[in-house]
Amino acid sequence: MKNSKEINSTRGVKNLLGDPKRAIRKISGPMIIAMLVQTLYNIVDGIWVAGLGSDRLAAVGLFFPVFMIIISLASGISVGGSSAISRKIGAKNKKLADTAAGHTLFMGVLIAVIITITVLPFLRNIFLSLGAENSVVDLVANYGKIIVGGTIILVFNNIASGILRGEGDTKRVMYAMGIGSVLNIVLDPIFIYTFNLGINGAAWATLVSMAVTSILAFYWLFIKKNTYISFNFKFLKFNNKILKEILRVGIPASLAQLSMALAIFILNAFIVKVGGTDGVAVFTSAWRIIMLGLVPLIGISIGVTAVTGAAFGAKNPEKLETGYFYGIKMGFLIEAIIISLIFVFASQLSYLFTYSKDTVHISGSLIKTLRQLVWFLPMVPMGMLTSAMFQGIGRGENSLILTIMRTLIFQVAFSWFLGIKMGYGLSGICWGVVFGNISASIISVLWGQIVIRKLKFASTKNED
């Protein structure tokens, strides 16, 4: 019986309610593996597209911020729902955990419909407004129509993943993401070259692989029904308090990712001005590799959000603090290794995107950009995991403030000053991203410590 899970919890729920360090390792591990495979797909996707020439590579890079907007809206609600589910599990209230999952899914479907209707007709105008060259605009618009047309699939993937993460079941998330990414890697060359679809083939490969992942998640949640969370829409009633909890984290999380997308739009505009289409191809290709360094941190942040959420629900600030700082320590250690590898093997990594005769001319610039952007990584654990902790305890607005401060204020300001004002071009923009992130990360961890101290003080006062 489903209700028996209030007593006989799943393995994921037991992890959430146990030792915070072990819980973060258990939850983060599968997510790190899954996201490494997914990031590998992103790189392979770029490698196959690079064979079509720098214009095609730039077109995919230009669409990336739009893709981020779609994902940000979906993952924002996903994070909000996941956080609410974890807190209800921490408070040992399964009924409200189920309610939170149902509300999250409903909002996800609604958002998917709105995105499709409002974005699809205006794709070409968006890229024209960015100042993209005419030869690239049609390429990116046609590529984007395929992805935006499949928004419902992208959104459901994120929502289902968030529900599973909320109950600590990241192994199934790993399986789904891994299968989807491997399938995408296999389909890319078939759709791009065998079917002769060009960059549109890369878009179709992405959509088909995500559809397969969605079918798998749907099977687990609605057919097999062996998750802790259960859906019963017949008796699901609107719960204003749960909705507010989800949105308090979900809206700031979406806005935070939207601010990152907007920041990349602005940075792309800067780069087009100082480096043209080749500059965009160089920066976006380097950023794909730098994203590899962020993958373990994204996995750890999922663990931190879930563990701190459960600890907050259980009113245990000591456990919350232990999980938060343990996550940061893990992040620092992993980033030190990744930075060394990227710096040393920059030449080999750049070859992945410059192997064709149409892209070889950007090789030197790509190596240089990689060795500059890699210094973005050392301070990321402090900022990213502080935001994750804020999301876990339901203070999404704090996380939003940190992200806006990092992306739209510090990174954009530093990049404009060094790249445009001081005339250092693409190098100046790269160093602007680095210095902006360092400044924001220091402020983030200080704020995180202050909030935890207040929680501990309030807990001690209540005990007295």
Image (spheres, grey):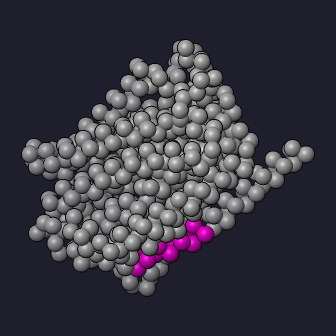
* Residue 286 horizontal side relative to residue 335, left or right: left
User: Residue at the spot x=73%, y=48% of the render?
Assistant: 317
* Magenta segment, prevailing SS (helix, strand or loop): helix
Q: Is residue 441 magenta?
A: yes
Give the image quarter of residue 349. Answer: bottom left
Residue 226, position as x, y percentages in the image: 47, 23
Magenta residues, as a range? 428-442
Above or below, comparing residue 14 to residue 463 in the picture: above
Q: Can you say whether 71 is above or below 341 in the image?
A: above
Residue 402 on image: x %, y %: 59, 60
What residue lies at 21% left-to-right and 58% top-to-bottom?
47
Quarter of the image where one finds residue 126: bottom left
Instruction: Judge from the rendering whether residue 307 lies leftward or rightward of residue 106; answer left or right.
Output: right
Q: Position of residue 374 (x, y in %)?
A: 40, 71
Q: Quadrant of residue 242?
A: top right
Q: Nearer the viewer, residue 239 or 457?
A: 457
- Left or right of 84 in this view: 362: left
Q: Is residue 324 left or right of residue 276?
A: right
Number of numbered discs overlaid on the protein picture: 0
Q: Nearer the viewer, residue 341 or 79?
A: 341
Q: Is-magenta flag for residue 222?
A: no
Extreme right residue here? 464
Residue 2 visible, this angle: yes
User: Is residue 411 at all visible to an observer of this figure?
Assistant: no
* Relative to 167, residue 378 above or below: below
Residue drawn where x is 22% and y is 74% of the image: 363
